Image: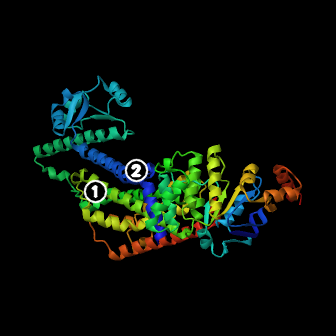
Amino acid sequence: MIVVNDIHKAFGAVRALRGVSFDAPDGKITGLLGPNGAGKSTTLRVLYTVLKPDAGTARIDGVDVVADSLGARQRIGALPHGAGLYPHLTARENIAYYARLCGLDKNCIEAKVAGIIELLEIQDFADRRTKGFSQGQRTKVALARALVHDPQNIILDEPTNGLDVMATRSLRHLILKLRSAGRCVLFSSHVMQEVAALCDDIVIIAAGKVAMSASAEGIRNQTGCDDLEDAFVHAIKLVEAE
Amino acid sequence: MSTLLVVFAKEILDNFRDRRTLVSALVMGPLFGPMLFAFVISLSIERSLSDADRPLELAVIGAERAPNLVRYLGSRNLEVVAGPADREAAIAAVDNGSLDVVVVIPEEFPAQLADGIPARVEVISDQANTQAERDARRARGALEEYALEIAAIRLVARGVSPLVIRAINVDDVDVSTPSGRSAILLGMMSYFFIFALLMGGMYLAIDTTAGERERGSLEPLLALPVTRDQLMLGKIAAACLFMALSLMLSLCSFYVALKFMPFEQLGMTPNFSPLVVVCAFLILIPFALLGASIMTLVASFTKSYKEAQTWLSIVLIAPTLPILIVSILTLRPQLAFMFVPSLSQHLLLVDMVKNEPVNLLHVAISVTSTLAIGALLTWICARLYRREGLLG
């Protein structure tokens, strides 16, 4: 469960976030939708605690990301945008490294890593060094790495970027699996169709503000647009008009 | 603590698989430095050794006019060969470098010698050419000795002791010990060790910030439930290990290389026993923490791997500065110098190689001050690693 309450963040003169609030409940997939530069990545970075908000609060399962950032990170599996692997380690070693860093019990690490490799269907290249992996293979390993400690909350920053149809499909299946396991999945995207197809709740973000936050159905109703893309454009125009 | 060890173990594994790190840590620093050093030293030793005894072919014009002189030159390892046709040809030959030195014995030489007036001999050489001038000096020296010998014979013939023309007898007394002399040559080797040590950890230091960032692996790493201090310390510890490895290899390769150098022939006996190797390692190793932290610190300000490499090459040279300044000003070792990292290690090492007693107080100050500065820099690194700007 992720609760974001009125977050502000500025980088020098650039006001990246100007009061972002939304909830991402357990057992649901929440999509953070917005044009490039809207503040999606900044919001997610605040949530996985590599950035500190200037104002506002964010809680992961009730743990404040500023007051107890370590505790918040324990409850998160994060896949930052363009996450890189260690090219001299095999996929399995990359995953095991994160498992160890997360403090998993020594005896169960091997089984845990094997389990996540199976879940993500990456057995074929699990024991190859990751140097020269395709974008799809890399994303899968990075995702496996982020999920190895069984986090309740999963934050994915543009996970489908650079993936082909097959890889996107299997990622979508995985996200649905996580939802049925009762996890809280929050992912960002600038691809409308993807968000519409997958998300229970959609948070449209533009110019550092939440333009609209509802289900796909709710957004259509609120904007009076039948087509979600039109609704998206409409919502963004509302914010930018302010 | 366990996080630190996990990071440490991963860095070791990762870097042992990285050819670039391995080459710089285990080949470049340890082998290249001592090899180059050994090559330069043995070359200069060869040269200075062989000069005096090496048979030299000396072109002489008019050798038939002075058979005794030719015989004398022969006894000094100067083998007389026929020179160019005449004086002009000789000057041309020396000028274009086909001959280094030509001795001209004029026609009137036998007559002047017989009459007891100074007999003229010309030595044609190019004094701007240092290599050729060395040979010319040998020819000139031999001619002067011949002149002295003849003068002595003449004095004896007149019933005068030849000692009257030796008013002063100059004797050089050299107080330097054989080990001391070698210290001059070996003084520069302490820098090679520091260089090897720094090279060993350079790529790991870059990787901690610029490398991880460029690869995109820094952000997911920071999103893990671990503190940044532990990540940082684990990486610095791994860099220190590689530095220690590099230093050890370079000391060993030096130990081997020195065995093949003809120091005895120069009257030098550098003290580089296995015990000295071990002590040198112990004296130099505190520099690893300082080196790892300062390189991590410098790399953390850079935007990319390339930029980090550029800046770190300056860090590689920096430790020479205090050594250089003290050598140029020829300052004697003193207590205050022991507070200066790299300089203190250098001075202690030189003392050991010179086989002079090493001041234990100096060792203690050198070790503690180097470690203290290293710890301070590590602390600053950790502070910087906590910044938001780290992600770039």
Q: B224 or B314: which is nearer to us?
A: B224
The picture places residue B337, in percent across and down from the top left corner, at: 42, 70
Q: Earlier in the sequence, mark 2 or mark 1?
A: 2
Amino acid at the residue labelled 2: Met
Q: Left or right? Give the position of B352 relative to B162.
A: right
Q: Nearer the viewer, mark 2 or mark 1?
A: 2
Q: Residue at the spot x=79%, y=60% of the render?
A: A215
Location of the C terminus of chain B (image quadrant): bottom right
Q: Residues within 10 Å of mark 1 (few under 14, many from 20)?
A: some
Q: Which image quadrant for residue B359?
A: bottom left
Q: Is residue B1 left or right of residue B108?
A: right
Give residue B302's position: percent from left, percent from top.
59, 57
In front of the other: B36 or B253: B253
User: What numbered label is drawn on residue B28?
Assistant: 2
Residue A164 lies in what quarter of the image? top right
Query: Taking B100 as reference, is B232 above or below it?
Result: below
Q: Residue drawn 64% across and 46% down? A: A163
Residue nearer the viewer, A171 or B272 = A171
Kind of residue indicated by mark 1:
Tyr
Per the image, the residue denoted by label 1 is B255
On the question of residue A61 being in view, the answer is: yes
Marks 2 and 1 sit apart, C-alpha to C-alpha, by 17 Å
